[in-house]
Image (cartoon, coloured by chain):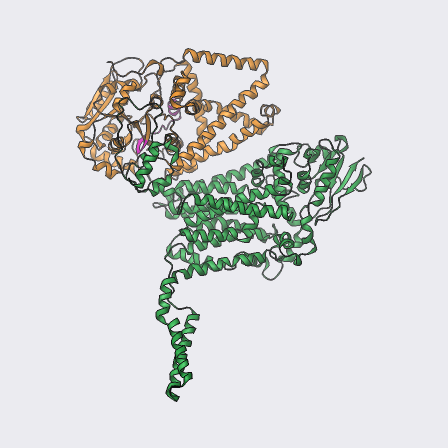
Amino acid sequence: MSASEARSEANARTSTGTSTGTSEDTMTVPIQRRPIQRRPVPHGPAPGEQVPGKVLSLVGDGSGTAAAEAAPARSGPRWAGLVLFVTAAATYLGGGVWLCLGHDSVTSDALSRTANGYYTVFSRDPHLAAVGFVWNPLPSLAQIPLLPLATVWPEFAYRGVAAAVQSALFMAGAVVYFRRTCLELGAGPRVAWALTVLFAVHPEIAYYGMNGMSEGSFLFFLLAATAALTRWVRTRASNPLAGAGLALGAAYLTRYETVAAGLVTTVFVGLVAYRRTRGPATLRRSAALGDMTVLALPFVFSFAVWAITSSLIIDSPFAQFTSANGNTAQTRLSAGGISSVIDQPGGPLGYMFDQSRVLEPFGALILAAALGMCWRRRDARLLAPIAVLGGAYSFSVAALLAGQTFGWLRFSITIVPVVLLAAATLLAHGPYPVPTTMPPAVRAARRAAARTVAAAARRRRSGGRSRSANRLATAGHRLTRRYGPGRYQHLALRHGHLVLPGVVLVMLAAAGPVTADGMLNPRLAREESYFLTQIFDPGRASPEQRRVVHRYVQDRTLARWLDRQRLPHGAVLLDAADGYEVVLSSRRPDQFAITPDRDFATLLGDPKGHRVRYLVTRLVSGSSPADAVADAHPRLQTDPAYRLARVEPNPGDLPAWHVYAVR
Amino acid sequence: MSGARVPDQFSARERLSLGQRITFGVTAAIVIGAFVLAPMAAMVGVIAVISLLYLAVFAERLVLLHRALRDPGLLRVSPERARAEPAENLPVYTVLIPAYREPEVLPHLLTAIADIEYPPDRLDVILLLEEDDDETYAAALAGDPPDYLRIVRVPYSEPRTKPKACNVGLTLARGDLVTIFDAEDRPDPLQLRQAAIAFREVPANVVCLQAKLAYFNHDQNLLTSWFTTEYAMWFDQMLPGLVRQDAPIPLGGTSNHFRADVLRDLGGWDPFNVTEDADLGVRLHRRGYRTLVLDSVTLEEANSDAINWLKQRSRWYKGYLQTWLVHSRQPIAICREIGVLGFLRFNLFVGGTPLLAVLNPLLWALTLMWFAGNLPIIERLFPTWLYFIGLVCLLLGNFTFVYCNVVAARATGIGRLVPQAVLSPAYWLLMSLAATKALLQLVIAPSYWEKTTHGLGAADPVDDDVDELASGAAAREVSHVGV
């Protein structure tokens, strides 16, 4: 019994054969038409007897079915993806727990996203819109199902573990999709594994898999889109195109850079569809328009829903750019800080180029070589990752040029998968070329051997067979034997095919130490170095960098101080955009009246009338450009209606909390 | 003429069984009582039930989609393989073609029959005409029909429906295999060979093969392009999912192929059910038989006129409701036959489709009121948990359904359909109208068959960009007329 027959038999025996198989079987099993024994069933089978679905799909000639064409390129066992996912997730999570519990190193963005999810469930006024409209909601929404764990293990939320779980899972998923894209690009299983490992352990990728920020989810959806779009370029099937569209739609809910990725990818899809449709121009146009619609619709939908919901609830469709806590406001506040960094020879573009060299020192070279190879082979597959990931990168470039972002190193993170995927293209089609010209070192050695032999011969001619001439001749022959043409060719034939992948992989592996060092560089990696220098190179840490690991100490002591007073609901007014950790670390989150609460404005207008006991506020800083409480009550210090009750002792790097009691 | 007859408990002759009357009566009494005693709570309850229903339909749809996309499991027989089959291996095949007062499509019909690549001595085509339909009869005679075509005039009796005519045809059929085509259909000429080969290779409990249906006049107007997309979605995304799920398959009206002995044993079609095909699919399944999808296309004419479309669609919905009522008469028996989950799915699919189409406008109105007026009553109607369900259905549900249409349109390879599929919510509005009409008609005239007019424009497929099948059929039309 052949393998396929055995499989058919097995499926025929299962009562729910319909759900046991997958399309991969039809693709990999050599399809044989096999007479299926007719059971003598004059009046139908017994009720409940079911059709073995698998056997039936084998009927036919097996010529490439649509499903098979649309199936993902796959090599190796199916559990490989699962093992990869579990390993990567466990590693990132371990690193994340080590960072947040071991070193109390949590980024404010990570914690505030956790808090946004937390408000929807545990605040005084739990409602979905409490997730907020300034930042894209998906990283927060993804944590909501995890957060009930915080009721039994409070550190899970307020120390940043929930955020780390979120980023670890998403980044592990991104790693899986990265490998899938490598295979779609034609890389063999070993090359794909090597590149996947290089991607997964790249310091920038690994750090953002651990630290709870939104890069993990962003890369997850971008790489899911990349894998699907590459498959679409390969197979032209509609389902992968829809998959890419859905992934981009979801990516918009993680980061605004997706706007550019979506636009660039839509144009790319239109061009590819137009070029490869045969027929009159109208037909080509309608095919291109159709494919662009399939790709762009989910993205347009999530864009529209987010903007409409946002304008219905907070009267502003794009709060990220208009809110007092949005990115635009933050950059405006710290524009001086950025300009000091990027106002140097080369300008913003030079700055970003330097950053790209930190992430992938040989990136430009590998990308250029891969593009050249694509052009020679007329293979457009690599353009799919470049459209998606490069599109996202173009947003970062444009935003920095417009002075709308901080130029963080992580805004260039998509460079890492782009370069590694370019390498996948470069190494896609083995057998690799055997070098026909000898490397310079070998050539020099051969020349030296020839010179030595010639010198020995000269000596022999001039002064007979002296011992030194003999020695020289022996040395020359030895050199010739080692580096002579025969020996060299033998070596080249045996191992020459490893030269190209070896060189490329070494160039890519160089990114590891270069990025690790660069992430502590306060000029190019301001954010990473701020958080990591104290941990990895304490000797180099500046005073602020030393204090950042104590950033949230004051929030937690303030929360404990408030908790002890057993205050009623809504007794403490606080702007959640900055005071998230106070709410997260409190055991009584409903004592706070926070900005997402629907009655916040009412309470803020008349604290005393609504039995508010405390107003909590602090000086504005780079990471908290506005404070709703301070804005509404600018003269708290001198207003006789309020009394400064407490200034929180503060070992951290942010201004201290001031608590004003309502008289 | 005696012969096949659907047992009474499976026939839509009686609308409601006693048990159903009692159940409906009691339910109505409870609902009315609740509205009288606690109107607000009753409203919330009704909305909760509806929302959960929508959520279930949405979830079911995602499952179907997943299964269909993962492995469509279509039966494929390549054209070469079909042509190569020696004639002596092919069984006698009966083709039933019911028609009523459509002399204008007769020439097309005769051409389509002539195109069928099947040994003439093993082909048994029966044109079923009503006794009083002289015009079609005359047209058929004038068209010089081939020897293997028999014209049968169905004697007058009520109800005058297509299934009754088909039952007459079934008693006269000589074939081991039977199929039905509509008069205006253009089946793939190799379909009978493909079906015959497939039947030999599938297990014996597969007694029905449904061929795919598509429309040749997709570019006639917006309605036909929506209709084409809808069919593409049905045959690409849903039917394969249902097959994979081992659920009862509501058959399409034409191009379903049967093993004749089993069909006779089952009693043929129910003449009182206006979607006798859907009903038959469920009945087959309940007896343990299975239906698979044959990857062969029959081109039909899509309804291009809105009124005509409404008539057709409301008949389909009425038939679905009839089928639902018929098979829910003995819930315990059907649960035993197709499982509790299968019965729930059957309810969602066969009963839910028309009922939700009726409810849709109500919920759209509620949504509009919520957006426009911000009325406090609506906030009270949706407590938080219900609000989330509603939100999921409103946003994700509607998006998913539109996007399924868009992807199905793309999969047809006809680029022009895709942007039109984005507008499919307007099509749903038409569906709601049809469903409302169906519900009313189910009460007033349950077995009344609204005949769909065919031959409205678009007689021949011309300049078809993608459907080579259709243009191939058109080309042959010229050369085979009169054969």
Q: Is residue A571 magenta?
A: no
Q: Residue A4: x percent and y percent?
A: 31, 40
Q: Residue B115: x percent and y percent?
A: 22, 32
Q: Residue at x 59, y 59 (%)?
A: A347
- Against B44, residue B424 (above or below) is below
Mark count? 0
* Shade representing chain A: green
Closer-to-camera residue (A648/A277): A648
> Which image quadrant for residue B234?
top left
Q: Quadrant of the N terminus of chain B?
A: top left
Q: Quadrant of the C terminus of chain B?
A: top left
Q: Report the residue that reaches farthest toward the front.
A: A467
> Which image quadrant for residue A160?
top right
Numbered range of the magenta stretch: B293-312
Q: Report the residue that reaches farthest toward the right.
A: A640
Closer-to-camera residue (A220/A323): A220
Judge whether residue A643 can be spotted in this image: yes
* Shade representing chain B: orange
Q: Residue B34: x percent and y percent?
A: 56, 15
- Against B460, residue A630 (above or below) is below
Q: Residue at x 39, y 78 (%)?
A: A474
Q: Residue A368: x percent and y percent?
A: 45, 58
Closer-to-camera residue (A67/B172): A67
